[in-house]
Amino acid sequence: MGWRMWRERQRGRERRLRVQAPQSHVVLLEHICGVKDEAGILELLTTEPDLVFKALYDNMIGDYTAFSKLNGCVPRVVQNANGAAAVAERLDQLLWFARGRFTCSSDVTNMRLVSAADRFEAEYQAQFKHAFMQGDCERMQGCARVLEHIRNGRSCIRILVDAHPLFSSAPPAPYADVLASTECVTDAHTFGAVLSELDNLIAEHARVVHAGLPSQVLRQSALYCFVQDLFDAKRSGVALRALQNMYAHLRSMPVAGQDASGEQQRRDVVPDEATKDIVYLSTVASIVSLLLEAADKWSHMEPVSLPRGLGRRCVFSAFEDVIDEYVQLERRVIERAYEGELSQWTLKVRNDSMRDTALESNASHKDESLRLVNFRLRQQQMEEYKDRVLLLVQDKLQISMDTETAGDGTRRRRRSSASQKEMPRRTVVGDVLGHAPVSIDLCLNMVLTNRDTIDRLAVFASAPQDMRLRDQA
């Protein structure tokens, strides 16, 4: 019947039991049992679940079975309800109840119930659309007060979003200019210009839904639906189109020494493939940061704001299709940098070994002491830098770090029982370090390479926890 119960994970705490029910059923439970919030519903379900189901069943089974005898009409519901809003709410309760298929003729009953609900909803949809075309906000709100009780008001929300000029087949001049500007996006700066136009469109739509819809919940849902469509490939997807054009531009950047067409020769040429990858990664990370700032701004808009979590969900949905490639590029950049550092180090070790062998007989005790002091000083600097890097990881990726005292210093390390059970993954570093000594310089250079990657990937840590993109990054 649309009910859902689950255990919500909370960092550092025991999992919390949650329950979600259709809004029309929550209203019905308040009328029958006197519960008004999630805590009250949870208490009833954990103590007397059978009584809760029986109360709901007894309340709705009579009106539900009446539809098996009536084709497309709602006489009993109309007689028992007080006003059109109450009829809409009762129809919504029955639509959710029908999912249980409690009678042998449930297929016929459900078909007639849906037909009656569609006919009732379509009547008020037509009135809402007519009032919208005439600019009659009072009538719009009157119709919306009925429609919000059936199917969460999605019908009036879709009317407002679908009627926006940006989504029409032939948008007028101001909106056509916005669509045309998406073709010129090549970097974070040009995307920022498009984002500024989108901010204006979102603020404009917020004023429209505030005037035409009666409740704040319905207004936020309408604004969320509009922002979703800006990032949706199935719709106009203005923001997504701008991102796709930018991806195409960055992937086609010419590399020095390669054959290029006349158009590519006129563009900026990158020295090598490694630089091309880093430009791509840095640009994407910068644009994600711009969009997160915009989502924070949407959460403080007037007269209607978009909750921060919903805004960020829209933003990150635009990167779901490219996150796999993005992570692979980050891995390739790290491995390429490691290979360069390791090759330079192994060459240095070979040369130093030959030089030390030649000068070994002439080395004095004073030189050895000085080299030892320098080694300890650089080791201390490395420890301090490592602590700062771990704090950065803890702050940006929200990873808790345990502390352990070793000697006179404090060392931070991440404990993960899951990772201890996994087999160590072979990497280019593991392959080479098994046959080469390690220096502070080498480790420091590798940490610096990791730091750049962490800075770029940290923007994806703000994604909602249930999104695949967050786990991938």
Image: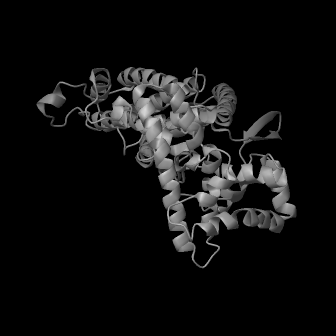
Asked whether, in this view, residue 23 is left or right of residue 306, the answer is right
Q: Nearer the viewer, residue 279 or 354?
A: 279
Asked whether, in this view, residue 55 is left or right of residue 383, the answer is right
Residue at x 28%, y 25% (from the top left corner):
172
290 is higher (above) or lower (below) than 55: above
Residue 174 falls in which quadrant of the image? top left
Asked whether, in this view, residue 428 is left or right of residue 266, the answer is right
Residue 204 position within the rendered picture, expressed as x and y whole percent measured from the top left: 46, 22
Q: Quadrant of the N terminus?
A: bottom right
Residue 74 position within the rendered picture, expressed as x and y whole percent measured from the top left: 57, 58
Residue 295 position within the rendered picture, expressed as x and y whole percent measured from the top left: 54, 29
Residue 366 position within the rendered picture, expressed as x and y whole percent measured from the top left: 67, 25
Residue 164 can be seen in this image: yes
Asked whether, in this view, residue 353 is left or right of residue 383, the answer is left
The number of discs equals 0
Residue at x 74%, y 62% (from the top left corner):
59
Q: Nearer the viewer, residue 90 or 221?
A: 90
Residue at x 56%, y 23% (from the top left corner):
297
Residue at x 41%, y 45% (from the top left corner):
322
368 is higher (above) or lower (below) than 109: above
Question: Looking at the image, which residue sits at the far right?
Answer: 47
